[in-house]
Image: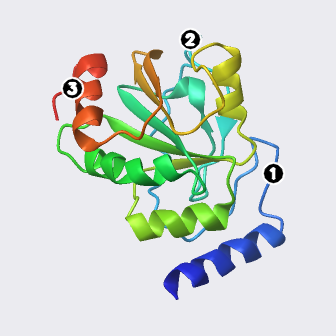
Amino acid sequence: MRRWAVTVLAGALLLAGCGSDDPKTTEPTVDGPFAECSALSAETPSADLPDVTLPCFHGGQSVRFSQLKGGVVVNLWASWCIPCTRELPAFTSLAGKKNAPTVIGVVTTDKRGSAAALAEELHVTFPTLFDERGRLLTTLVQQEHLKSNGLPATLFLKDGQIAYAYQGAALDEAKLTGLVDQYLGVKV
């Protein structure tokens, strides 16, 4: 019943015109489990990261991808993607670990209501951006950081660069923490 209520609420917000193509426009707050995005950006953009601005799923300020700071793990996912749903618990676990890098989700080519319902069901609480049209994914493929528009996709960012891009089978917790250690130099 709870999942249905979240889906109905998010659908009502979509029908009320909550979307915008203007990255300067603030998205309205959407009920969901995600954390705020306000602490994600540095002041200076990196020339090595795609310059795509996406709204925070939870509302508030948009995030310019090229301004993500520090060691960051970015997971592009969608509720309709079965491997994505399998690996989301590993990202939630990583985000909750003491010395973990920042974990950011990017809901990609999905609907708000469906993503919010899945995130609530799986207890996903890390900051998440909303990319209904898949602009970041398309840019990553065009810039040859990723091989295809397939999901899931995970980026490991270090010092304003993509240290590693993973696309393929769902990551489990052991594989994910191994990649964090290998590409970000962080033991969790």
Q: Which amino acid does label 3 sit on?
A: Val
- Tell me: residue 164, above or below residue 80: above
Give percent across and percent down for residue 70: 37, 25
Residue located at (82% from left, 45% from top) = 21
| Residue extending furthest toward the bottom | 1
Task: Determine the CA span between mark 3 and mark 2.
Answer: 21 Å
Earlier in the chain: of badge 3 and badge 1, it is 1
Give percent across and percent down for residue 88: 40, 51
Q: Which amino acid does label 2 sit on?
A: Asp
Question: 92 left or right of 15?
Answer: left
SS at badge 3: loop
> Badge 3 is on which residue?
186
Give percent across and percent down for residue 22: 81, 43
Earlier in the chain: of badge 3 and badge 2, it is 2
Determine which of the numbered discs, if any, sits on residue 48 in the image. 2
Q: Picture quarter containing residue 94?
A: top left
Label 1 environment density (alpha carbons within 10 Å; few <14, some 14–19, many ≥20):
few
Earlier in the chain: of badge 2 and badge 1, it is 1
Residue 129 seen in this snapshot: yes
Label 2 environment density (alpha carbons within 10 Å; few <14, some 14–19, many ≥20):
few
Task: Determine the CA span between mark 2 and mark 1.
Answer: 26 Å
Q: What residue type is labelled 1?
A: Ser
Task: Determine the CA span between mark 3 and mark 1.
Answer: 37 Å
SS at badge 2: loop
> Badge 1 is on which residue?
20
SS at badge 1: loop
Give percent across and percent down for residue 179: 29, 25
Quarter of the figure with the C terminus:
top left
Residue located at (76% from left, 43% from top) = 133
